[in-house]
Image (cartoon, rainbow, N blue to C red):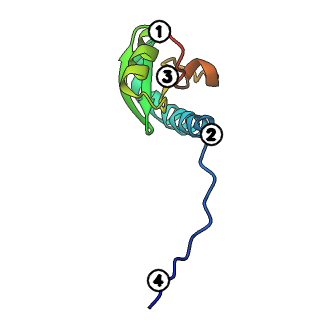
């Protein structure tokens, strides 16, 4: 009996920019929700986030980005400054950017 192979149409791969943008947006939403709980303890720190979870806090943006680059080589992380008011640092300043800091 002959084998019949039915192929599914292939989905276009999600670009790394689309994946990073989606990760940043989801992390930012989660960060806004966590901010009232963390602001008094981590004020002025920079939070590294992945999968809507804060991984760690750092004193400087540079340290947070270095950590993110080392731990998440796929670039799917974000960095957000902990302040009493929500500040969106912009995609290129807190997305997993591969440039050295």
The residue drawn where x is 52% and y is 77% is: 5
For residue 48, what is the image quadrant? top left
Find residue 7 and report its horizontal and vertical position in percent. 56, 71
Q: Earlier in the sequence, mark 2 or mark 3?
A: 2
Is residue 96 in sight in this rendering? yes
Disc 3, SS: strand
Q: Is residue 37 above or below residue 84?
A: below
Q: Is residue 11 above or below residue 35?
A: below
The residue tagged 4 is 3
Find residue 97 and report its horizontal and vertical position in percent. 54, 21
Find residue 41 and report its horizontal and vertical position in percent. 36, 18
The residue tagged 1 is 62
Disc 1, SS: helix
Find residue 60 and report its horizontal and vertical position in percent. 44, 8
Q: Earlier in the sequence, mark 2 or mark 1?
A: 2
Kindly report which numbered mark, 3 or 4, lies closer to the viewer in this rendering: 4
Distance Cα–Cα, label 4 vs label 1: 57 Å
Disc 4, SS: loop
The residue drawn where x is 41% and y is 10% is: 63
Which numbered dot is residue 79? Answer: 3
The residue drawn where x is 60% and y is 60% is: 10
Which numbered dot is residue 87? Answer: none
Distance Cα–Cα, label 1 vs label 3: 10 Å
The residue tagged 2 is 18
1, 45: nearer the viewer: 1
């Amino acid at each position: 009996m002959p084998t019949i192979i039915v192929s599914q149409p292939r989905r276009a791969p999600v670009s790394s920019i689309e994946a990073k943008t989606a990760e940043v947006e989801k992390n930012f939403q989660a960060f806004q929700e966590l901010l009232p709980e963390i602001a008094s303890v981590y004020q002025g720190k920079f939070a590294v986030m992945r999968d809507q979870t804060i991984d760690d806090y750092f004193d400087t943006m540079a340290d947070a980005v270095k950590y993110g680059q080392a731990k998440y080589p796929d670039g799917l992380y974000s960095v957000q400054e902990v302040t009493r008011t929500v500040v969106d640092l912009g995609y290129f300043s807190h997305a997993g950017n591969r440039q050295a800091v």
